[in-house]
Image (spheres, coloured by chain):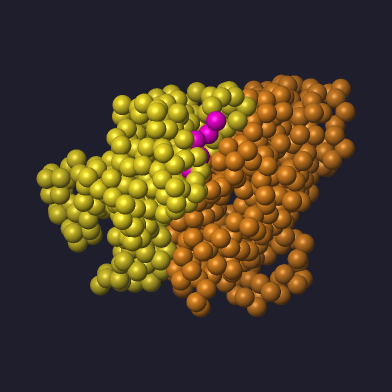
Chain colours: A yellow, B orange
Amino acid sequence: MTDDLATVGERAALARIIPRLARAEALLGPGDDAALLAAPDGRVLLSTDAMVQGPDFRRAWSTPFELGWKAAVTNLIDVAAMGGRPTGLLVALAAPGETPVEDLEGIADGLAAACAELAPGVGVVGGDLTRSPVLALSITVTGSLDGRAPVLRSGARPGDVLAYSGRLGLAAAGLRLLFATGEEDADAIAALRHRHGPLLAEQLAPRPPIADGVRAAEGGATAMLDVSDGLALDARRIAEASGVRIDLDAAALAPGDLDGGEAHALLATFGRSTPIPATFRVLGRVLDGSGLTVGGEPYAGRGGWDPFVDGAASSPRTATGGTGAADSENTAVSP
Amino acid sequence: MTDDLATVGERAALARIIPRLARAEALLGPGDDAALLAAPDGRVLLSTDAMVQGPDFRRAWSTPFELGWKAAVTNLIDVAAMGGRPTGLLVALAAPGETPVEDLEGIADGLAAACAELAPGVGVVGGDLTRSPVLALSITVTGSLDGRAPVLRSGARPGDVLAYSGRLGLAAAGLRLLFATGEEDADAIAALRHRHGPLLAEQLAPRPPIADGVRAAEGGATAMLDVSDGLALDARRIAEASGVRIDLDAAALAPGDLDGGEAHALLATFGRSTPIPATFRVLGRVLDGSGLTVGGEPYAGRGGWDPFVDGAASSPRTATGGTGAADSENTAVSP
């Protein structure tokens, strides 16, 4: 393969990648030492998230386009969860020298497509390309509250209604299918894509409800977060931060909703007399007390995910495993 | 070792790390889905840079404190190079499960110390901790221009004076010493630290002149950048962006200044009649034409560094090398 990063070099690779990225509405974009972005109300929302080959994704499962897409949306949703409007992305891409430049073009296309579809006007305002033994994407997202107060985790009050927008559980179901293929079997994965395309897409190229963050804030949401570690854990986070109990309506839950990792949803609370935005569905209510209950009964499931403890524990070494980097290729994203 | 990330888990590790980080003057710090930072003049400067174990640093050479320090300063200087005042850092840290939590504490201490010394008031406003086969630090820095125009690379005009603040060449000299140790020989490195501490510090824990970015901007700098890829290449960048020729004064240069990678300096141009800030030293002048000359003679040296082309070429596989991640441990930072 002649067309890899080590052959082409950083400068020529960037010349191929940058034109494919979504154009950002920056005051000053890539090319100088720093970008300059408008912060119209004198404040800027900021969040950062990294995805590393092995623990967070497999090259055998995700296309480069899907990697770029997912890296973008998992960051964009963090701004939405504050009630903010995403305004820009900074992308630190680390890749082995033998990575085909075509793969980086695919990542750029996925980033651009995700922004165009789910956060129009957002683009990449800055970045970095470094060499690394494994592919990794570290993204920082910026956002604007446009003068509103941020919607925190701590604002839920007894009497509020709990509601969500997006998908629960499906991403975890997609991941279980992928694990069942035997991890790196290309034929099995191709067959799976053919049979279960939409379900796999929930895991590999999810469409979280990014625009609903502003809708919820404008609709008077009292607390909000994005469900990233399973509904049970994230509902508990609101309960803990707000000093309340959250009671989920058992009839509103589908199997797997509570503990599925990597849901792509916004979970918010609204005052009792506030009309809930049309894209949100009621899931429960906020009560005096603490912790999480389902239909009034304490919920014992842990419903969380620790990349170090669970990541290592859920994936015993396989026959193809070795030491160091090779091992983590065989380690789970979520159980 | 019981006290590693895989044993302790993400949450407990973060509980140990976060209190050690410099406290940021954020409107809303870590703990929600995104941080909220003031952008007093309605704009925000943003830059991102990653450091990956292997290509960018060696665990055998750098202490965790030094890694944190260097990751902070190499980002802070990017805001300074625009004439900006750094306001915050977002830190995505990726580490193997077997990393001692103590190492992450050391990284946090280095980040905090660099901010306290070189950019007081700046702290970590957000971050991410992920599992990875190698240690990697990806940092995004934010900054404020406090109402000033950004100082671009493109503003140099014929007649301007070229000046720098900081150190040229010394970091490269420090790196040559480290390579001469045989790469991973702990005793040789300890001896080197004893004999050449200050020179090694230029490479491992540099002190770039971060506060001089605002000084230069307030002093009327017409163009500026941070010298990160060698003086020759970075002077050429100003020449190219500004459509001018830059002529360096041979008498002002020390051996190694021109092509040393990883200088830690700001390079700026000032109008002929502008008094140059006291911390800057004159290095040459801006003329009609294009490209780089030294004492009027064309300078042919490439003076650049490509992490893919040069990184791979400068470091043949060694006897301890293997495949994949292990290889890049043996691959050079810069030649």
Q: Is residue B246 above or below residue B250?
A: above
Disc tally is 0
Residue B117 in the image, given as x and y percentages of width and height: 76, 51
Q: Residue at the location (69% across, 57% down)? A: B205
Image spot of residue B74 (x, y percent): 64, 47
Q: Is residue A152 above or below residue A180?
A: above
> Does residue B179 appear left or right of residue A288 in this picture?
right
Which quadrant of the figure has residue B143? top right
Quadrant for residue A209, please give it.
top left
Percent position (x, y) of residue B263?
69, 48
Q: Is residue B72 visible?
A: yes
Residue found at x 48% / y 69% = B8
Residue at (69% x, 60% y) in the render = B174
Q: Nearer the viewer, residue B114 or B311?
A: B114
Quarter occupied by the C terminus of chain B = bottom right
What's the residue at 31%, 26% (across, down)? A278
In this picture, is B221 found above or below B251?
above
Tell me the chief SS of the magenta region: loop
In the image, taking residue B240 as reference, residue A234 lies left or right, namely left
> As displayed, is residue B193 above or below residue B142?
below
Q: Magenta part of the protein: which range?
A: A149-153
- Based on the picture, tell me whether residue B192 belongs to the magenta stretch: no
Residue A328 seen = no
The x, y position of residue A139, in whole percent, is 47, 42
